Image (cartoon, rainbow, N blue to C red):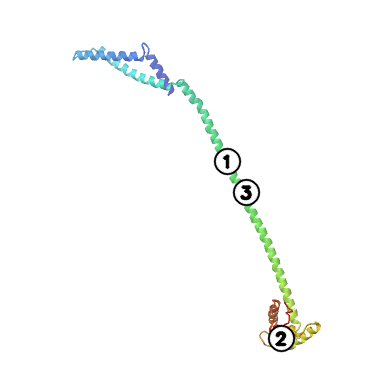
Amino acid sequence: MLRKLLLLGAMAAAMAQDGGLYAEYARAREARSTTASAAAVSPLPVRTHQQQREVLQQKQQAKMLRKLLLLGAMAAAMAQDGGLYAEYARAREARPAQRGEMLKTAGWFGLGFGISHLWARAAKRKLRKDHKETLRRYAQALLEANGQVQQLSNELYQRQIDDLEQDYSEFKAPDSNGDDQITKPEFMAYMRQYVASQPGLSLSDFPTFEEWDLNSNGKVTFKEWQEVMEFLEAGGQTASQATGGTKNLYA
């Protein structure tokens, strides 16, 4: 477009010689005025073919001059500040710089996107690794806790077995006939023998046979023996002990 405007400006300058564009325009208007005056004087002017062609040429020249004047004004307005070519040259010079800025911006954007993507992947891998490590530690702690629970359970079971064996051995001591039941004669014979071997003790320091025989059927079973022993070991006292004011030897 700039080249076209330069060409039109040159054409306008070439046609504006011999007094300039305005002089040519003034001559065309004067010829038109003369023609109009002649037409007013003679109501029916008679024009030759040559005259008509000259009038038509003058009209065309005037029309062209107006267009050229307009184009020249436009060219002069756009040619300020160093001329049209300078404006065109500046535009072309600025284009690579703008393209370079755009490429630089796009490069920084791509670099930032790549770094953020890599960081997100690294964070995800670290989170997955930490999660696996947490699960591993939890499983290890659970196994250790299970082992400790199992050990405590075994120890408790063994302690219960030991206590049960001890209670049973104490229960079997008065059972002279080995029928897993203690009668009153067996109980009294064992207690007299036991008190005789323990100086300072008497039969009143221990529960009576009736207090061991919970169901009062005349026989003490191992279950009854265990219930009375648990009561005494918990600090309880039988009726005979409370009445006699004796100390609980089983607590």
Return the residue found at the far top: 18
Q: In the shown orientation, is residue 242 left or right of residue 11?
A: right
**Label 3 crowd (10 A; few <14 / some 14-19 / many >=20):** few
Camera-side residue: 135 or 245? 245
Estimate the spatial distance between the alpha carbons at disc 1 and disc 3, rounded to whole Å.
18 Å
Estimate the spatial distance between the alpha carbons at disc 1 and disc 2, rounded to whole Å.
92 Å
Residue 140: image location, x then y, percent: 67, 58
Q: Which residue is mark 1?
A: 114
- The three-letter amino acid code for the residue at tag 3 is Lys
Placement of 86 over or under 107, stated as above or below? above
The mark lying in front, picked from 1 and 2, is: 2
The image quadrant where one finds the N terminus is top left
Placement of 248 over or under 158, stated as above or below? below
- The three-letter amino acid code for the residue at tag 1 is Gly
Q: Tags 1 and 2 in contact by the CB under 8 Å rule?
A: no
The mark lying in front, picked from 2 and 3, is: 2
The kind of secondary structure element at disc 3 is helix
- Disc 1 or 3, which lies upstream in sequence? 1
The kind of secondary structure element at disc 2 is helix
Residue 12: image location, x then y, percent: 38, 17
Residue 161: image location, x then y, percent: 72, 74
- Disc 2 or 3, which lies upstream in sequence? 3
Camera-side residue: 230 or 205? 205
Q: Which residue is mark 2?
A: 209
For residue 126, the mark is: 3
Estimate the spatial distance between the alpha carbons at disc 2 and disc 3, rounded to whole Å.
75 Å
For residue 233, the mark is: none
- Disc 1 or 2, which lies upstream in sequence? 1
* The quarter of the displayed image where residue 49 is located: top left
- The three-letter amino acid code for the residue at tag 2 is Phe
